[in-house]
Amino acid sequence: MVAAAQARPKSARDGAWQVDPGFGVYVHIPFCRHRCHYCDFNTYEGLENERAPYVDAVIAEIRNWPDPRPATSIFFGGGTPTLLDAASLGRIVDAISDRFGIAAGAEITVEANPETVDERVARDLRRAGFGRISLGIQSAVAPVLAGLGRTHSAATALAALHAVSNGGFEDVNADLIYGSPWESDDDWVTSLQAVIAAAPDHVSAYALTIEEGTPLHTLIATGREPDVDPDVQASRHTVACELLDGAGYERYEISNWSKPGRASRHNVLYWSAGDYVGFGAGAHSHVAGHRWWSVRLPRDYIAAASAGRSTMAGEERLDPDHRAGEALMLGLRLADGIEVDGFGRRFGGRALDDRADTLASLESRGLIERESGRLRLSAGGTLLANEALYPLI
């Protein structure tokens, strides 16, 4: 009698929580042509004269990093990294390779706005070392794009999805935002169907959040625009699940879907509470419960990094219990949740025992469930994730 073959353990590319998440490197490029109405990231319009010195400063900080280890994923975010030419971005990738080393099979991602890429740029980015690209599509409907403050058209966004694939990218993500005050039910279906037709490997669909200090927050606070409706956003998430699941995408995290084996390794590292270091203005890092962040202004960052000084603006050290609580909250965002035994090995046997009453309450309310040695959000809990997860910290 032949024994049944054991199932292959799920990997990060399957979207599964990892006992050993690897090690990530994040590079922040803060430059934008236009700051979107909803954006609260550390981004700046213009600053053309600071771009070349900024690249040199990032490379200098990478070369001076005292504790390198091979990167299993690298992510260039922003801002709009593709406002820099591919050669400049490639210099940073090379510096990471020289100082840290890049593990076999590592995922190297660059974010891009649609108006900054075409087939030629895509080919240049591939030659610079990038294997994955994430495009900020956000919507395929003109009034929604205008309300969000996006400067590209729907046609430009969808053309960019085809261009990067034709330019050699076999790992493509499309970012969408749903639930804005200007979006109808039909608009959301139109955006989903347009992206599905372009067939990217991965789709991120995020509910619009209103962050203090943004132009959109001011418009809503002064009554010039209506606020977002949580019930509408929940309905839009359900529609996304239906259409994306029907098109062969698997939801592996609350807001992320991928074709089989195309989940983002770097994002799974975050949700598995892995270690990563960030380079660039305002970049955040986390290593073994030590979290820190860099100075925000590009000119301050350039001055410090170029002179070999610390760029740190602040830090905090998590005690073991707080670290375990954050790791649990992050891990339960994944559709398959956490592996209970593996979580205990990483964070100590008491990490879950000390939260037994809270977990039992969430389970009795139908927000979380246990199955086959895993703990995860239920379907209903996914729509109430904040309510379910924050008590666990």
Image (tube, rainbow, N blue to C red):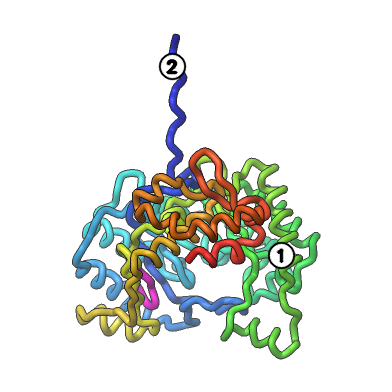
Q: Which mark is residue 261?
A: none
- The residue depicted at 50 percent of the width and 56 percent of the height is 356
Between the residue at mark 1 and the residue at mark 2, the CA separation in whole angstroms equals 48 Å
Front-most of 386 and 154?
386
Q: Give 127 or 141, whichever is nearer the viewer.
A: 141
The three-letter amino acid code for the residue at tag 1 is: Gln
Q: Which residue is mark 2?
A: 3
Left/right placement of residue 373 relative to residue 295 reads right
> Which dot, 1 or 2, sits closer to the camera?
2
Q: Amino acid at mark 2?
A: Ala
- Which residue is identified by label 1? 233
Q: What is the secondary structure assignment of the residue under circle 1?
A: helix
Tell me where the magenta segment starts and ends, as one range: 278-285
Q: Along the horizontal axis of the image, is 149 left or right of 313? A: right
Magenta-span inclusion, residue 374: no
- Rendered location of residue 336, percent (x, y): 53, 46
Res 69 quadrant in image:
bottom left
- Label whose residue precedes the other's in the sequence (1 or 2): 2
Q: In the rendered structure, does residue 280 fall within the stretch colored magenta? A: yes
Q: Are marks 1 and 2 in contact (CB under 8 Å)?
A: no
Is disc 1 surrounded by few (<14), some (14 to 19) or many (20+) residues within 10 Å? some
- What is the secondary structure assignment of the residue under circle 2? loop
**Relative height, residue 206 to residue 280 (above, below):** above
